[in-house]
């Protein structure tokens, strides 16, 4: 076992001290609206450019960072879940982004970032990733917040993102649908602001959301998913960090065979891109203990063999390869245009 796998295994074990609460709702009987639907149908496009509210900007030299908010256009497919969505989870009705740009003008390109599961907000990225992309790639940068995270965390969650990915399967699928919808709304807004080129990148769960934006019309001009794949069935079975979800599904009576059947009928794993392979750069870890390298390779082949930057280490050690990742991002044709 390499160092990356060891780190992933330790963190997966430590997550047992975090995920102390079981899922309350068994919604496996409400999955019919989500089964056997193509991704384009499962994840419809936002209808309008969002009416964005802009908070007082933070100035740092020639750079400005603003907080944007808008009403999410996401509409749940399950009527019973829709009641929770509009009441108990009302904080998710507002979407947020942090936008880093030059003062007084727009650059040609903007890079949207989607963070990973369980991250509380954008402060880490604003201190590390976003300034480097802004400076070294010559792009403006925006960070879209996932449902159930940060400001969108409903009262009652024990930690950020607790209710995004659980054995409450309807809520989990709706969280993914809403995340994609909100990213697409952000793309509409930034195109309306005059950006000629918009890319999307994301890490782990955010990388999976990034991949899904490549599978719908009117999406980004390029994508850089990092440490991600769309093999939902295998992720639930293999990833130690998802032990609570798997345990609760078994408690609800969904054994391995039933889980495989349901996840295969939620067609996320079958999604295929509308974005050409040359508009994609994937970053994958050779020793990822959560998202196996062979599954990433299998999906890449099904997607027409986009370039994959293979880095050493595992899921949680990707920051060690950040220099290589940024260098590779410079070579994405659309970004370099």
Image: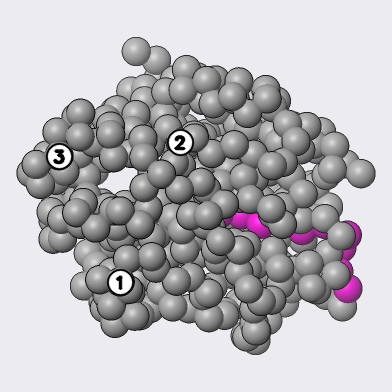
Say if residue 241 shows up in the picture: no
- Cα distance in 3D space between marks 1 and 2: 25 Å
Q: Which residue in the rendered view is the most extreme toward the right?
A: 337
At a point 28% along the width and 32% down the height, the residue shown is 260
For the record, the magenta segment spans 105-116
Q: Nearer the viewer, mark 1 or mark 2?
A: 1
Q: Earlier in the sequence, mark 1 or mark 3?
A: 1
- Give coordinates of residue 11: x percent, y percent: 29, 36
- Cα distance in 3D space between marks 2 and 3: 19 Å
As for residue 108 lying within the magenta part, the answer is yes
- Report the residue marked by disc 2: 269
At a point 64% along the width and 45% down the height, the residue shown is 214
- Give coordinates of residue 211: x percent, y percent: 58, 43
The answer to whether mark 2 and mark 3 are in CB contact below 8 A is no
As for residue 228 lying within the magenta part, the answer is no
The answer to whether mark 1 and mark 2 are in CB contact below 8 A is no
Helix or strand or loop: what does disc 2 sit on?
Answer: helix
The answer to whether mark 1 and mark 3 are in CB contact below 8 A is no
Q: Earlier in the sequence, mark 1 or mark 2?
A: 1
- Cα distance in 3D space between marks 1 and 3: 23 Å
Give 337 or 315, whichever is nearer the viewer. 337
- Report the residue marked by disc 3: 254
Helix or strand or loop: what does disc 3 sit on?
Answer: loop
At a point 63% along the width and 50% down the height, the residue shown is 216
Q: Tell me the tag on residue 79.
A: 1
Helix or strand or loop: what does disc 1 sit on?
Answer: helix
Give 39 or 68, whichever is nearer the viewer. 39
């Amino acid at each position: 076992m390499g160092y990356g796998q060891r780190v992933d295994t330790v963190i997966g074990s430590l997550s047992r001290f975090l995920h102390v609460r079981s899922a309350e709702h068994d919604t496996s009987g409400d999955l019919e609206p989500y089964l056997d639907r193509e991704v384009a149908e499962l994840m419809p496009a936002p209808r309008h450019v969002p009416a964005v509210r802009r908070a007082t900007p933070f100035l740092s030299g020639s750079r400005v960072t603003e907080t944007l908010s808008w009403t999410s256009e996401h509409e749940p497919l399950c009527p019973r879940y829709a009641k929770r969505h509009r009441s108990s989870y009302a904080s998710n009705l507002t979407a947020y982004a942090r936008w880093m740009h030059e003062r007084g003008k727009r650059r040609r390109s903007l890079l949207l970032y989607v963070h990973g599961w369980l991250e509380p907000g954008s402060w880490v990225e604003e201190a590390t990733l976003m300034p480097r992309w802004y400076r070294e790639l010559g792009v403006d940068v925006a960070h879209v917040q996932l449902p159930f995270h940060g400001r969108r965390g409903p009262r009652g969650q024990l930690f950020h993102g607790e209710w995004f990915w659980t054995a409450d399967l309807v809520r989990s699928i709706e969280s993914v649908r809403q995340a994609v919808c909100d990213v697409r709304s952000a793309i509409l807004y930034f195109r309306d602001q005059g950006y000629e080129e918009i890319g999307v990148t994301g890490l782990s769960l955010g990388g999976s959301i990034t991949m899904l934006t490549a599978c719908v019309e009117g999406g980004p001009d390029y994508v850089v998913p990092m440490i991600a794949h769309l093999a939902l069935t295998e992720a639930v079975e293999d990833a130690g960090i998802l032990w609570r979800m798997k345990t609760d599904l078994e408690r609800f009576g969904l054994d391995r065979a039933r889980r495989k059947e349901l996840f295969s009928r939620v067609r996320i794993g079958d999604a295929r891109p509308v974005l050409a392979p040359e508009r994609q750069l994937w970053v994958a870890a050779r020793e990822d203990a959560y998202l196996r390298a062979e599954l990433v390779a299998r999906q890449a082949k099904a997607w027409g063999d986009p370039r994959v930057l293979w880095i050493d280490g595992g899921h949680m050690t990707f920051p060690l390869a950040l220099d290589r990742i940024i260098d590779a991002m410079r070579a994405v044709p659309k970004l370099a245009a």
